[in-house]
Image (cartoon, rainbow, N blue to C red):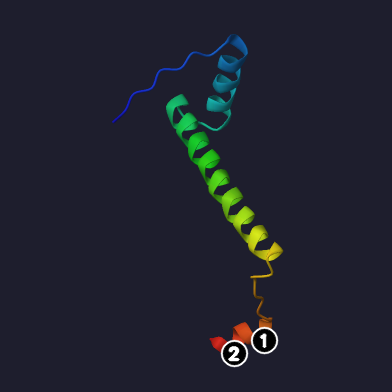
Amino acid sequence: MAVVSIRLNTEEARIIDFLSKEYDEDKSTLIKKTIIEMYEDYIDKNYIENFENKEKERKTAYLSAEDILNSL
């Protein structure tokens, strides 16, 4: 397991203390959850960009609700 040390200025420390109390999470867990959330945002952004690029190239296909229900 890796250990990471971070320096927080007064405002950052105040914010993390507030969030830790507000969400009833220890500071380490709060930071870990934030990192995971940011990574999920990154993955989502890439997925959307790939879809938009395919859409620009007219390589996307759409199914009607009826087609989806018929495939079940």
| Residue at screen point 53% across, 46% down | 40
| Residue at screen point 57% across, 11% down | 9
Q: Give the secondary structure at mark 2.
A: helix
Q: Residues within 10 Å of mark 1 (few under 14, many from 20)?
A: few
- Where 3 sits versus 41, above or below? above
Question: 43 or 12: nearer the eye?
Answer: 43
Q: Residues within 10 Å of mark 2 (few under 14, many from 20)?
A: few
- Are the two marked residues, 2 and 1, in contact with CB atoms closer than 8 angstroms? yes
Question: For the residue marked with disc 1, what is the amino acid?
Answer: Glu
Question: 41 or 34: nearer the eye?
Answer: 41
Residue extending farthest to the top is 10
Which x, y percent locates residue 71? 55, 87
| Residue at screen point 62% across, 13% down | 11
Residue picked out by circle 1: 66
Q: Give the secondary structure at mark 1.
A: helix
Question: For the residue marked with disc 2, what is the amino acid?
Answer: Asn
| Residue at screen point 28% across, 31% down | 1
Residue picked out by circle 2: 70
Q: CA distance from mark 2 to mark 1?
A: 6 Å
